[in-house]
Image (cartoon, helix red, strand yellow):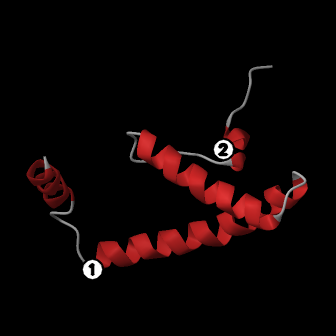
Amino acid sequence: MIKQFLCIINSEFKDYNRRKFLQDLMAGITVAAVALPLALAFGVSSGTTAAAGLITAIVAGIIISSLSGAFYQISGPTGAIDVHPKS
């Protein structure tokens, strides 16, 4: 089982290099710059503490990413902005 997992990881990162890592790092910093203040604000606006909003955002992100099979996904409180009901 571990050998199979390592084979999957190895094939997934086969073409991964320093340039792609730097792009991923920049994307992560950009997402953090947007998501962290939102998480703090949603925690306070819901009547709890900013720390509760931050912890909820982190835990929800881990759960959603572990249950999803998609490469790209929208999650969190701002994900509802992308859903437009028909009039």
Q: Which residue is mark 2?
A: 79
Q: Is residue 39 visible?
A: no
Residue at the location (51% across, 47% down)?
Answer: 63
Label 2 secondary element: helix
Find residue 58 and report its horizontal and vertical position in percent.
Answer: 59, 59
Left or right position of 75 against 71: right
Residue at the location (54% across, 74% down)?
Answer: 29
User: On screen, 8 above or below 82?
Assistant: below
User: On screen, 52 above or below 83?
Assistant: below
Q: Quadrant of the C terminus?
A: top right
Find residue 23 and report its horizontal and vertical position in percent.
Answer: 40, 73
Instruction: Name which residue type carries label 1.
Output: Arg
Q: Which residue is mark 1?
A: 18
Left or right position of 20 against 28: left
Q: CA distance from mark 2 to mark 1?
A: 31 Å
* Neighbourhood count class around disc 2 (C-alpha, 10 Å): few under 14, some 14–19, many 20 upward: few
Left or right position of 31 against 26: right
Which label is found at residue 64?
none
From the viewer's side, name the closer residue of 72 and 40. 40
